[in-house]
Image (spheres, rainbow, N blue to C red):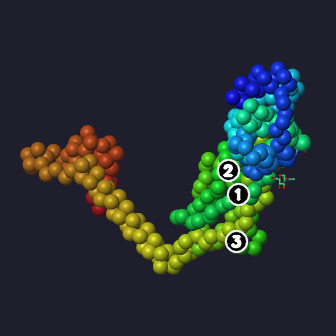
Amino acid sequence: MWIFCSLISCFLTGGVAVLPAPQNLTVLSINMKHLLMWNPVAQPREPVLYSVEYQGEYESLYMSHIWIPSSRCSPTNSLECDVTDDITATVPYNFRVRALLGSQTSAWSTLERPFNRNSTVLMAPRMEVTEHGLHLVVKLEDPGPQFEFLVVYWRREPGATEHVKVVKSRDTPVHIETMEPGAMYCVKAQAWVKAIGRHSTFSQTQCVEMQGEPLPLALALFAFVAFLLVLMVVLLSVWKMGQLLQYSCCPTVVLPDTLKITGSSQKLITCREEADACAVAVLSSEHLFGVWISQT
Ligand SMILES: *[C@@H]1O[C@H](CO)[C@@H](O)[C@H](O)[C@H]1NC(C)=O
Ligand SMILES: *[C@@H]1O[C@H](CO)[C@@H](O)[C@H](O)[C@H]1NC(C)=O
């Protein structure tokens, strides 16, 4: 009915504005959520509906001031309208609202000053800090995909340096590696919205203590003993390996006496094919022995 009215009769006749227009239009904007609100139009009969339209900078500059019906409130029976989805750029937006009652429509009531989303109130992020396996786990409330967080953390001690980590809102909770058992770490965070180039104030600082004692003496001793044991095993196996290699390289073969030619050349034959180095070693030691024998 109201569509019929607004399209035909109201347009042609110029509209009969018997209904008072909604007053006191304001935009309440917190954390990039924008809510257009207005005062109710007092009417004893039937529920009054409201229709909201907007005009961005683009529409007002390049599209001969055309007004676009708000995606969520055309019409609505509420006294507020979530216009977050209508505002897609950081430029001034105009809004207007009118009341509808049966076939009657009120005059349009317009926002006093255009709204720019860069005036949104950014709240310090709500934050929860816990400890998990020598990591700081920072959980941040996610106000939407446009948000990023600056997470600042430091070890609580005099003259500590602050570390900064930038976290996208979809990446929380974030794990921060700290690796200092028994130490106390503190965290604070700030929201940042790139689209409007602004950030919130910092959240309240929260501190947690990392679990575990600073490495105790008993543990250090245990680690040392374990290291010695491993070293012994390694040395033993190297020695054993050396023995095995020696046997496979230069097996001591006892030949029948008939096959023996001379003492020194027989060992040489056995070793020749296996490893030259070994053969040379045997040869030279036998040779030296021979030399030594002949000299004495
Ligand atoms: C206008 O709206 C604001 C926000 O809803 C409210 O605080 C204020 O009291 C209203 N003013 C009048 C005159 O109704
Ligand atoms: C928002 O943007 C407008 C124009 O782009 C600028 O004049 C105004 O100072 C900005 N406001 C804030 C709170 O940043």
Residue at x 22%, y 47% (from the top left corner): 267
Circle 1 residue: 125
Residue at x 24%, y 49% (from the top left corner): 248
Residue 137, image x, y percentages: 59, 60
Q: CA distance from mark 1 to mark 3?
A: 22 Å
- Which part of the image, by quadrant, shows the N terminus? top right
Q: Is residue 54 above or below residue 255?
A: above
Residue 54, image x, y percentages: 80, 34
Of residues 278 and 117, the one nearer the viewer is 117
Circle 2 residue: 143
Callout 2 amino acid: Pro
Q: Is residue 56 visible?
A: no
> Disc 1, disc 3: CB below 8 Å?
no
Q: Secondary structure at mark 3?
A: loop
Q: Secondary structure at mark 1?
A: loop
On the picture, is 65 further left or further right than 151?
Answer: right
Callout 1 amino acid: Pro
Near mark 3 (Cα within 10 A), the count class, few <14, some 14-19 or many ≥20, is some
Q: Earlier in the sequence, mark 1 or mark 2?
A: 1
Q: Earlier in the sequence, mark 1 or mark 3?
A: 1
> Disc 1, disc 2: CB below 8 Å?
yes
Residue 87, image x, y percentages: 76, 37
Circle 3 residue: 156
Near mark 1 (Cα within 10 A), the count class, few <14, some 14-19 or many ≥20, is many
Q: Which disc number belongs to residue 110?
A: none
Q: Secondary structure at mark 2?
A: loop
Residue 289, image x, y percentages: 29, 56
Near mark 2 (Cα within 10 A), the count class, few <14, some 14-19 or many ≥20, is some
Q: Earlier in the sequence, mark 3 or mark 2?
A: 2
Callout 3 amino acid: Arg
Q: How many marks?
A: 3
Q: Is residue 109 visible?
A: yes
